[in-house]
Amino acid sequence: MAEEKKKKGFLSKLGFKSKDEKRAEEAAKRAEEQKRVDEQMAARMAAINAAALKSARTMDGQDETETSDEEKARQEAEDQRQSEIQAAKDLARAKQLAEERAREQTLKAEREAKVKAAKEKAEAEAKALAEKQAALAAERAEAQRKEAEEQAKAEARRKTEEDAALKAAKDAEEKAALLAKTEAEAKARAEAEAAKKAEIARQEEAARKAAEEEAEKLAEKQAKEAEAERLKQLAEEAQEAERRARIAEERATREANEREALAKAEAERRAKLEAEGKLAPQVEPTPVRTNFLDRISAGLRKSTSRMSDSMAASFNKRTLDDEALEDLEDILIASDLGTGAAMKVTSRLAESKFDKQITDLEIKIALADVISEILTPLEKPIVLGSIKPQIMLFVGVNGSGKTTTLGKIAKRFTDEGKKVLIAAGDTFRAAAFEQLSVWGERANAPVMSGKLGSDAAGLVYDAIDRARREEFDILMIDTAGRLQNRTELMDELSKILRVIKKQDETAPHHSILVLDATVGQNALMQTEAFAKTAEVSGLIMTKLDGTAKGGVLVALSDKYKLPIHCIGIGERIEDLENFSAPVFAAALSGVADEMSE
């Protein structure tokens, strides 16, 4: 103690302060600072309480303007006194809470100090014990060398483990401190980053709005330029189409004249032979009208034959095992039926026929059942509503048969006594109006058209207006064929739909997608594109008689579940029939052919 006092005295003479003196000064400074903070807090609380009392009197209906200056001063003094009393109470409570927190922190520090002292004591005892054991081991080293060596090794291992444990504990403490520091720094950085991002976002939003305005102006300019280029291209395409149509018409006329000349020569030859008695008069056979099943079976012959031939070659009394099921699934997928329908057929056969002999007829029957199950819920003839005019929009790609299909349906409605107006919305194809005019004459329905390359949406607007004025029952709108991957053409179709909806929010009452069966799986992509743009309400599939890909209607229906109105199996008017799922299933699967044999 005397040495410590001498040391402190020596340090004081040199101008240095001990730790206790520094702590005392720091405590004095903190007390002074706390006193100043308390005084400021008391002043604030007094002001707040005074304002609160004043506000309370105002809310209680006191009018300051009607109170005398003396009374007002008295009230303010009283308010000041009450606020100071309340502030003193609040300050005392705050000090009490601070002292309680300080006591808690002191207790926590004492507990940590005790734990640390206990830990140090345990380490010291362990170290003393180790030294004692080492001394005893040295005394017995001469007599028990092996045992001493083993114990020394064990002791070394134990000590190593203890050192490792102590090091691990120390590392853990350092990591915890580093983690806490890192978290605090990360929080500060995150807050700064958030503020910076908010400012950047505000600037980006302003820049985005400016860019959008600039982009709109640029897009408008580009749209005008694209429209001019498109009109030019369409005009060129129209001229080319007109030239091809003229060549085709000339070829058809030439072929018709040749056939007529040959028929006339043949008739003259037969008449001469009959007059000479060398040939009996020819009696024309009475035409036999086949039913729809016979006609659709004939129309789907290409689709059916390829699938039937493959099944007949693979399943002639063959045992239905896993390999056979895989072969069948491949055949059905290759026939454009789609994976879903193929898996349903193979699953159904596997349940009842697995590991048994099976014929191609049994497979055809199962296939017909699955096709019928998929398609039957989608049978939906075109049914007119009560709103007049019923607006029917026909959409699809080039060459799908939209115009021909529209004409056939128009003829059907006029035969039923309906008043039909046709709008030639394909203003870009030179032969479109002529083709519709022919169908209009057949159906006894007027056809509205515009100039070549004119705005189709404007024509549609005028057609709706006329249909209302002249009380037509149905307005049928043909549209230009457009590829589903040409955005600008699909945008024009969207424009037509917007014009229709401005005239009638419930229209179009029927948006019919006409698909060409010969395109096979490409019909799936067409359906997806037009369903989004044209609000397709139903399908008509044409040219089933000219393709081996008729099974695509099953894949299409299994995926999109769109109603099927009609199917086309030929060029004649009667070859467009209302869709029947059981009949189609029997024809496509080949069951109808088996029944007719």
Image: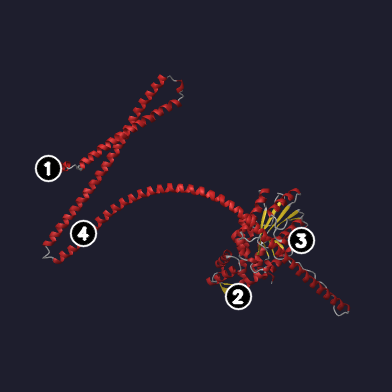
The C terminus appears in which quarter of the rendering?
A: bottom right
Q: Is residue 475 left or right of residue 323?
A: right
The span from disc 3 to disc 2 (Cα, nearest Å) is: 47 Å
Pick the residue in front: 293 or 550: 550
Mark toward the viewer: 2 or 4: 4
Mark closer to the chain start, 4 or 3: 4
Relative vertical location of residue 57 with respect to residue 114 in this rendering, above or below: above
Amino acid beneath label 1: Ala
The span from disc 2 to disc 4 (Cα, nearest Å) is: 83 Å
Q: Is residue 119 left or right of residue 548?
A: left
Q: Secondary structure at mark 4?
A: helix
Q: Position of residue 103 (x, y in %)?
A: 27, 39
Q: Secondary structure at mark 1?
A: helix
The residue singled out by tag 2 in the image is 313
Mark closer to the chain start, 2 or 4: 4
Q: Secondary structure at mark 2?
A: helix
Tell me the tag on residue 438: 3
Mark toward the viewer: 4 or 3: 3
The residue singled out by tag 4 in the image is 159
Determine which quarter of the picture holds residue 563: bottom right
Q: Residues within 10 Å of mark 3 (few under 14, many from 20)?
A: some
The span from disc 1 to disc 4 (Cα, nearest Å) is: 40 Å
Determine which quarter of the picture holds residue 433: bottom right
Mark toward the viewer: 3 or 1: 1
The residue singled out by tag 1 in the image is 2
Q: Is residue 561 left or right of residue 153?
A: right
Q: Are marks 3 and 2 in contact (CB under 8 Å)?
A: no
